[in-house]
Image (cartoon, rainbow, N blue to C red):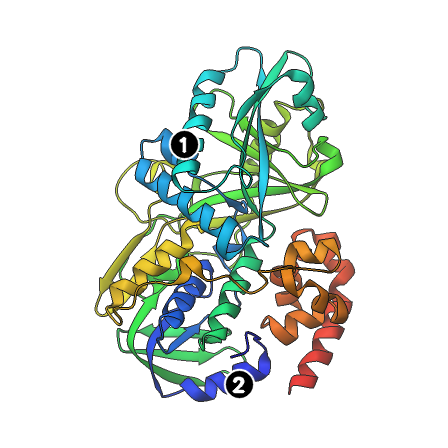
Amino acid sequence: MSTSLNAARRRRDLAAVADATVDLLVVGGGVTGAGVALDAASRGLDVCLVEARDLAFGTSRWSSKLVHGGLRYLARGEVGLAHESAVERGVLMTRTAPHLVRALPQLVPLHGRAHDPLVLAGLRAGDVLRRLAGTPSRVLPGPRRVPAAEALALVPGLRSRDLRGGLLGFDGQLVDDARLVVALARTAAGFGARVITRAEVTALTGRAAHVRDGLTGETFTIRARAAVNAAGVWAGNLVDVKLRPSRGSHLVLRADALGVGRTALTVPVPGRRDRFALVLPQLDDRVHVGLTDEPVAGPIPDVPRVPESDVDFLLGVASSVLERELTRADVLGGFAGLRPLLDTGDGPSADLSRRHAVLTDGGVTTVVGGKLTTYRRMAADAVDATGLTRVRSRTKWLPLVGSGPARGPARLVARYGSEAHRVAEVGEFAWAVRHEGALDADDVLDRRTRIGLVAADRRAAEDEARRRVAEELAALA
């Protein structure tokens, strides 16, 4: 079956599921929901995924874009969770999505009397997990200490005064987190899953969902043998589950403003031995600086904002290891995501476990917590919990759309893999509408191409995006 998602297929899928019964209804079109849809469809189940807005609309597009091996979990003694992360990182990098994930060199700069023995021990422990997970060193090289001259060659913008060298390690980096979600959804569609965006679930039970079509306003019912609630930070709107969302903010800066090349920086937060900020180079000569971990109370916003306090904090931490001090004039944009953490008691949100939870109540299986890296394991556990099938999960071995030999412009190959040459023929805007389920210019700019991460870039492209999307939708009508 075709992996293409578009307005015409959406109409057909809506007609097929309205007032019908499917095996599994999945609510939520983020990385977890798309992962659940793929896992279930690849096991032979009749699957329908409904998403209130767009694929990767929520937390999944606001991550650090790291596919990491769980060093933070090791530091907290969560060895099992760290091993799970290392295994899933290896699956993504070597089997399912090698076209979307690259090895990212990360440097911990050592200035003055830095606590390098502890950090180096952590990097070496992480490398042990890498080996245990079966990820070869040609994919992720082992860590090593580098002298000051090499550290400056890797990151010319480092402060040279009192620089003693650095610790160099490697982790995985997604070219784009939203692209992973789209690839998952399209791969699920290839197994027959119906993926319907702009379809808001207003009430959910284990046997049925009341749905409102966001394009027409019409309402209908989808019946199912089981339902998975993968709505992320909005999961509590559908079932009785208590979450403690945590905000993770990032800034977008020019790479030349920081003097950063292709090597990321892991920067110790001054005064803390257990917290680090990240300076993450992107393929578009931009740099993302993150990451905060602050509790958020009150209603969940559609698009979280980066508060001024987070801007000041991130600029200050990054500046602490750079030759020049960063100012707000260097900031091109920013984004923040809300982690759907399960409320397990008192204490700061930063101390809550990132282990995922699968909860079943009233016939609805809810999956919350976890990390982008471990989405596949979360999805498999959720499908297992529904009891719909005894077939084991197959997704550990299923390559996603775009895997395989690729040709075309390097920038497109990095984002589209083996489909790059086809994208080059029609253009990214048209491709997003014809094959990736984009229904308006916002879908194209903010989630398919990520042009919208910088407001000035978005304004420059908006008229062309609207014109092209209108033409493509008219052709599909």
Amino acid type at circle 1 is Val
Q: How many marks?
A: 2
Residue visible at 50% across and 61% down in the picture: 399
Where is residue 210? Give x, y as percent: 36, 79
Pick the residue in front: 148 or 13.
148
Asked if residue 164 can be seen in this view, the reply is yes
Is 397 situated left or right of 310 in this image? left
Q: Residue furthest left?
A: 362
Residue visible at 29% across and 47% down in the picture: 343
Where is residue 202? Give x, y as percent: 38, 74
Q: Which mark is residue 11?
A: 2
Asked if residue 159 can be seen in this view, the reply is no
Whole-Å distance between the Cαs marked 1 and 2?
Answer: 50 Å
Amino acid type at circle 2 is Arg
Residue, disc 1: 128
Residue visible at 46% across and 22% down in the picture: 119
Tell me the quadrant of the picture where the C terminus can be found.
bottom right
Is 165 situated left or right of 126 in this image? right
Determine which quarter of the picture holds residue 20. bottom left
Determine which quarter of the picture holds residue 295. top left
Pick the residue in front: 72 or 139.
139
Q: Nearer the viewer, mark 1 or mark 2?
A: 1
385 relative to 246, above or below: below
Element assignment for label 2:
helix
Where is residue 284? Give x, y as percent: 71, 47
Is 368 situated left or right of 438 in this image? left
106 relative to 33, above or below: above
Is 166 situated left or right of 208 in this image? right
Residue density around tag 2, few if under 14, some if 14–19, many if 20 or more, within 10 Å: few
Pick the residue in front: 307 or 418.
418
Element assignment for label 1:
helix
